[in-house]
Amino acid sequence: MALPLEGLAAIVTGAGRGLGRAEALELARLGAAVVVNDYGQPGRDGSGEASAGPAEEVAREIRSAGGTALAHTGDVADFEQARALVELAIGEFGKLDILVNNAGILRDRMVFSMAEDEWDAVVRVHLKGHFNTTRFAAAHWRDRSKAASGPVYGRIVNTSSEAFLAGSAGQPNYAAAKGGVVGLTTSTALALAKYGVTANAICPRARTRMTEDVFAGFAPPDEGGLDPLAPEHVAPLVGYLASPAAARINGQLLVAHGGMVAVVERPRVRAKFDSKEDVFGYEELDAVLGAHFADRPPGETFAAAEVLGLRRGQE
């Protein structure tokens, strides 16, 4: 029996550790040949010397299990290195079918204390890194589609975050970049649908090097217990979205952790007000909007549960 991704070639960025590693292993388990990309810097803030070690280790792990994999240690936030990554996959496997964008760093700071380089570095890796690889993969699929005079196979899975959906006070750079990833995903989905390519984004809840502070109060279970925050529980969704079975899923945002997957609805209008005059003035706006938000304490914003409804029992 053929595996779901047999004969397909994939790239996973940021795949030397954590979620990216789990995703690369899952794609390989499902039959894909995988280029494991990781810049290899030890610091979650992007600090330290780049190293081939993490990417090479995961590629060896895949090959040891009988799969096909090679390592790439370039910086996907660099335009030319991202080009080289895509060209490596095409050169080695004859084509590229799946792109999973996962690479990222954190430089957390409150907005009033954030330095320019802390903003630029996070947006560069998360948002520009997603764009760079997408740009060259998309060109490859467009060229193949033109040559074939019809649609080809292509899957993009991008990594956003609930920090974009519900806010994260100490991560204005990260939240903005992850919101940008969603915009990039929906735009890409519309642009590439006619070529047979889908693009979706996930918001994973997983305990990794990047989220160790977020989930500091949620200790892993005792040995043998199920850890709902293990990256391995998110990876199957990525494998599914990369598969032929997910052809009808395009331009979507999904939240995943443990035994839960939620499809996030696009923003809807909660309330609508029409002016009694031709246009609104200050006083009338104060009357209608002031009344609408009267039950909220000053300064209160929406809560994650209000946006997503993802508490257990509310799925």
Image (tube, helix red, strand yellow):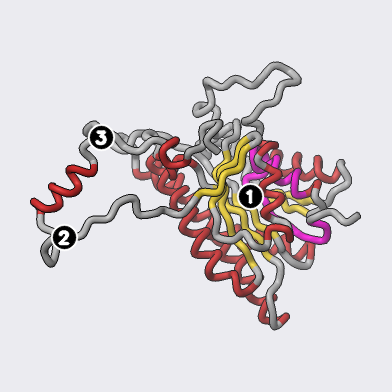
Crowd band around label 3 with a 10 angstrom C-alpha radius: few (<14), some (14–19), many (20+): few
Identity, as a three-letter code, of the amino acid under mark 3:
Arg
Residue at 38%, 41% (x, y): give it: 172
The residue tagged 2 is: 275
Q: Check residue 299 in the rendering and tell me which mark sits there, or answer none.
A: none
Q: Secondary structure at mark 1?
A: loop
Residue at 50%, 26% (x, y): give it: 213
Position of residue 154 in the picture relative to residue 291 (left or right)? right
Q: Secondary structure at mark 2?
A: loop
Which residue is nearer to you in this view: 130 or 4? Answer: 4
Q: Secondary structure at mark 3?
A: loop
Give the mark, 2 or 1, whose residue is nearer the N terminus.
1
Residue found at the very far left of the displayed protein:
283
The residue tagged 1 is: 13
Location of the C terminus (image quadrant): top right
Give the mark toward the camera: 3 or 1.
3
x, y (%) of residue 251? Answer: 55, 60
Give the mark, 3 or 2, whose residue is nearer the N terminus.
2
- The magenta segment is 5-27
Total number of numbered discs in the rendering: 3
The residue tagged 3 is: 296
x, y (%) of residue 239? Answer: 71, 50
Identity, as a three-letter code, of the amino acid under mark 1:
Thr
Give the mark, 3 or 1, whose residue is nearer the N terminus.
1
Crowd band around label 2 with a 10 angstrom C-alpha radius: few (<14), some (14–19), many (20+): few
Residue at 49%, 64% (x, y): give it: 187
- Please say whether residue 261 is visible from this viewpoint: yes
Q: Is residue 30 above or below residue 16?
A: below
Location of the N terminus (image quadrant): bottom right
Look at the numbered discs 3 and 1 and tell me whether their residues touch, using CB distance below 8 Å.
Answer: no
Quadrant of res 156? bottom right
Identity, as a three-letter code, of the amino acid under mark 2:
Ser
